[in-house]
Image (cartoon, rainbow, N blue to C red):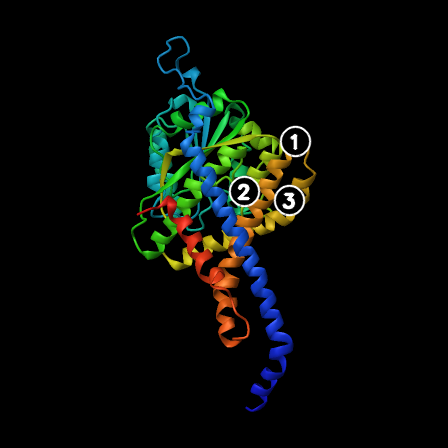
């Protein structure tokens, strides 16, 4: 037993202390970078609000004509709506009902329910629900696959391969726990119809179970910042942001030009958005168009979601870095925004700091008192970042 303290004393001064000091210095540097990024976002969003740089003032979005007797329903483009789902026993009726209730001409709306469920009982329930809406006159199809290759990206890709999709100009995507309001398409499609340079219109998520428990309240604060500040700023400054995977409408020609859905990472939505942006397409975020959704209320579901959101972007960054750097269709400013702000700060440094610094480095300094962390690094900057993150949810 005496050997352990002796070994610790021998490696502490020459090895542990220098390594821990180096780790503290690196983490403090990353904390400062993260803090400066938050301050930058606060300044820009303040300018956007003061100057009233709303999307409807930057882009044409006139409502589509509804009362033209000559054009009739042909004034409306054909829209494909995809609902990917996997064993969604609790919410499948809500999502299918909400999509089938969209205020859009029935002959200009095509609904696909892409069911990858492994539970045969749930698959039969979903199929029967689709048949029920089909009898009401909705053009809805129920589709399954032989295997789950590619998961969500594979299901969306398979849905786009049908011949009738060629008649569709736009595709709206809603996960199974999302319920759009009836006027969703009428508020988003005009941006795509009147602005041929726009590829994506993204709506905001509205959480129906935010007050269910402490974990959902914390998630609401984090995601409200993401939508209220990050998406708004990115849309206003350089017309680029990460597609949230649901509650968005894509121009199908832009999806095809970008190479369609790929399953090389767990963030297929972000992958498609970056490839489309590198082709020169623009994105618009509409914060006043909100789609009801649910937050993970169990730790297991939350952990799975966070693992996907944390590991996927880093893997995608590794695969696409050189493609972004060598691209000739976008400006150097957009490249800097994508590489530094979007990937490095928000998707990599933010996660490293959250775990490594606060959960490992700071506790480790308790056992090595020679290594000191300045108060501004462990108190003031984290407190400032937390306050800035809370601006989207002031309550």
**Earlier sequence position, callout 2 versus callout 1:** 2
Comparing labels 2 and 1, the label whose residue is closer to the camera: 1
Mark seen at residue 320: 3
- Alpha carbons under labels 2 and 3: distance apart: 11 Å
Query: For numbered disc 3, what is the local secondary structure?
Result: helix
Can see residue 297? Answer: no
Classify mark 3: residues with Cα within 10 Å, few (<14), some (14-19) or many (20+).
Answer: some
Residue pushed farthest right?
A: 326
Q: Position of residue 324 (x, y in %)?
A: 65, 40
Q: Are marks 2 and 3 in contact (CB under 8 Å)?
A: no
81 to the left or right of 19: left
Query: For numbered disc 1, what is the local secondary structure?
Result: loop
- Alpha carbons under labels 2 and 1: distance apart: 19 Å
Residue occupying image coordinates x 59% and y 31% = 256
Q: Position of residue 172 (x, y in %)?
A: 45, 32
**Closer to the camera, 186 or 222?**
222
Mark seen at residue 229: none
Can see residue 289? Answer: yes
Q: Position of residue 257 (x, y in %)?
A: 61, 30
Query: For numbered disc 2, what is the local secondary structure?
Result: helix
Residue hosting label 1: 329
Classify mark 2: residues with Cα within 10 Å, few (<14), some (14-19) or many (20+).
Answer: some
Comparing labels 3 and 1, the label whose residue is closer to the camera: 1
Residue hosting label 2: 270
- Point out the image quarter for the N terminus: bottom right
Residue pushed farthest top?
A: 70
**Earlier sequence position, callout 3 versus callout 1:** 3
Q: Are marks 2 and 1 in contact (CB under 8 Å)?
A: no
């Amino acid at each position: 037993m005496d050997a352990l303290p002796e070994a610790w004393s021998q490696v502490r001064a020459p090895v542990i202390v220098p390594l821990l000091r180096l780790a503290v210095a690196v983490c403090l540097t990353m904390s400062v970078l993260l803090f400066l990024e938050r301050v930058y976002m606060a300044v820009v969003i303040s300018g956007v609000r003061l100057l009233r740089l709303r999307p409807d003032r930057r882009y044409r979005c006139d409502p589509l004509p509804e009362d033209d007797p000559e054009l009739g329903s042909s004034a409306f483009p054909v829209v494909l709506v995809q609902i990917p789902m996997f064993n969604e026993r609790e919410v499948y009726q809500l999502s299918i009902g909400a999509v089938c209730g969209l205020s859009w001409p029935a002959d200009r709306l095509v609904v696909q329910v892409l069911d990858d469920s492994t539970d045969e009982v749930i698959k039969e329930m979903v199929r029967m629900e689709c048949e029920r809406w089909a009898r009401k006159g909705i053009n809805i199809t129920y589709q399954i696959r032989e295997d789950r290759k590619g998961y969500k990206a594979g299901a969306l890709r398979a849905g786009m391969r049908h011949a009738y999709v060629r008649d569709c100009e736009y595709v709206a995507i809603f996960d199974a726990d999302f319920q759009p309001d009836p006027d969703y398409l009428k508020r988003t499609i005009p941006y795509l119809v009147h602005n041929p340079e726009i590829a994506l219109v993204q709506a905001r998520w509205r959480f129906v179970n935010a007050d269910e428990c402490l974990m959902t309240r914390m998630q609401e604060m984090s995601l409200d910042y993401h939508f209220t500040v990050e998406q708004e700023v990115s849309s206003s400054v350089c017309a680029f942001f990460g597609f949230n995977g649901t509650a968005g409408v894509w121009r199908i020609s832009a999806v095809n030009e970008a190479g369609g859905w790929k399953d090389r990472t767990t963030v297929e939505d972000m992958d498609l958005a970056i490839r489309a942006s590198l082709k020169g397409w623009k994105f618009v975020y509409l914060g006043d168009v909100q789609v009801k959704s649910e937050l993970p209320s169990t730790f297991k579901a939350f952990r799975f979601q966070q693992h996907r959101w944390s590991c996927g972007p880093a893997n995608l960054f590794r695969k696409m870095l050189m493609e972004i750097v060598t691209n000739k269709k976008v400006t150097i400013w957009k490249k800097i925004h994508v590489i530094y702000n979007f990937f490095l700060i928000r998707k990599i440094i933010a996660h490293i700091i959250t775990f490594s610094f606060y959960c490992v480095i700071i506790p480790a300094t308790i056992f090595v008192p020679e290594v000191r962390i300045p108060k501004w690094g462990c108190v003031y900057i984290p407190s400032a970042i937390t306050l800035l993150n809370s601006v989207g949810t002031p309550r």
